[in-house]
Amino acid sequence: MNHFDLLAPINPELSAGAIFSFFVFVVTLLVGVAAGLIVLIDGDRRLKKFKLNIFHGFLIFFLFSLLLVMGRFLWSNSYLYEGELSYIQYEDSVKVYEGESIVYEDVVLKPGDTVNDYAWAYEITGEADVFNKISFLEALFNAALYLAIPFIGILLFWLVFYALGALFYNWGKKPSVDLSGILFSIGIGAALMSFFGFGLALVGLFYPWPFLLLAGVSLVLGKRHVQALYVFCKKKLAIPLKKISWLSFGMGAILLLLLSISFVLASASVPSGFDDFGYYMNLPNLIANTHGFVHYYGLYGFAILQAVAISFQGTTGLAQVLTFSFGVLSLLLIYVFTAAFLNKKLAFFMAVVLATVPFFAAHSSIELKVELPLLFYGGLSFLSFYYFTKKNQTKWLVLSGLMAGFAVLIKLTAVLLVFALVFLFFSYYWKLRGGLLAGSIILFVISFLDLGDYGFMKETGLIVFGVISVIGLIVLGAHVLRKDKKLK
């Protein structure tokens, strides 16, 4: 199934030359802005001291996303839809459960929507007189409103996640903020909201008002943490304009372009990918519309959070952007992790590199499944374990296990993450002998897993893993009996 969003930044029906001219327009605009800033900074001493902070970054990101949408206006006509609510159903998405057919249904067009892909919209509605050509200013207003809802919604989600998670992350301590603490707090808060929503679904109370109540309580109780976050973002996450090099500006522009395109595509009112349409957005959509628990194959860890977003907006747009937002958080996590080993410049470079990986870009825009939340929680688990090895505090080990556990609730393949942590734990405490033992046990356990045609036992046989396990036990026994220090 192919779906081209009505406000996609690139019209798929445009010629290659038109698309190329669009990108030339964007690049020229970026270079023009950069040159203008350089001239202004050189001529004004006050601008030399001006610092860009994270709030300026949010504004620039939104304006750039709006530019991508309106840039298309220059290459194709825009229309205002004035018909009735139009729905779309795909027979491919019909699921039969306990004798009942469940069809995924979502709003495609509603009065006041700005439409660029006129041919696609006409094919859906079958009416031509409900589309009226509009001016640039009208299209600009509608596009800004269209993007503002998911943009503000995600910022509010992050804020509530942080306020809720910071209460537990900073338990018994004064509010203190750093990048890793922000990420851990958001991760903890999102997990807690997921458990809260799961409980509401079980008792048939999955409505917006309980989540509004939870958000209000979290913001009130976490007021000091939110205030500390504001000060940190304004002062610490800031850089003087004069210190931004051309290389940093170029990498930042690339990152901004990729994230803006992904954000616009993710905000579509209908999922683009077949798996998203049939399952990953179908399950949360059913939970939100039935206001209760829905028996479905798969896991509910992240689906509950997506259902919360759908219950507020009514369509899957905000839920899809929520998935995209965990990709942004993963980029910040990669930055923090890399900076701990190398330096901030290389950490920023690695974050940009990750954003350019096709797999990451696809799962941030059109294949909005659960891989990005899985990446985020898996990364938090490893980062927490790293802090455990450096600080030797049990709380980091516990937090590592909790983050890995929630990752398993998002997707079962995260069980491999648990195996990796077991291996690292034994290797940390018992060095080589512990690593051999842990590796043997892990392989032995995997050999019993029912993984279908790709199961390890079917491919290599249980005997191989049994032999490896015996070798690991022998090495461990040799150390215990002889105290062979060479094995350390």
Image: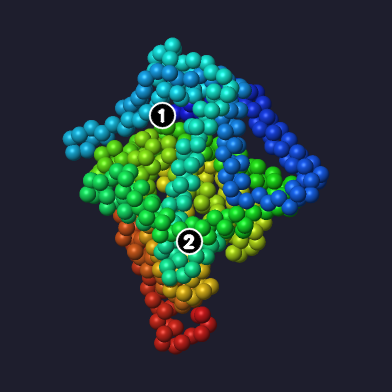
Q: Nearer the viewer, residue 374 or 160?
A: 160
Residue 254 image offset from top left, x and y in percent:
64, 42
Which residue lies under the disc numbered 2? Answer: 224
Quarter of the figure that contains the N terminus: top left
Which is more N-terminal, label 2 or label 1? 1
Residue 278 image offset from top left, x and y in percent:
34, 36
Q: Residues within 10 Å of mark 2 (few under 14, many from 20)?
A: some
Which numbered disc, 1 or 2, marks the residue closer to the eye? 2
What residue is drawn where x is 37% and y is 73%? Answer: 470
Relative height, residue 123 to residue 422 (above, below): above
Colouring method of the image: rainbow
Q: Nearer the viewer, residue 413 or 83?
A: 83
Relative height, residue 260 to residue 372 (above, below): above
Horizontal side, residue 344 vs residue 122: left or right:
right
Residue 191: which numbered mark, if any? none
Relative height, residue 44 to residue 395 (above, below): above
What residue is drawn where x is 60% and y is 32%? Answer: 67
Which residue lies under the disc numbered 1? Answer: 1
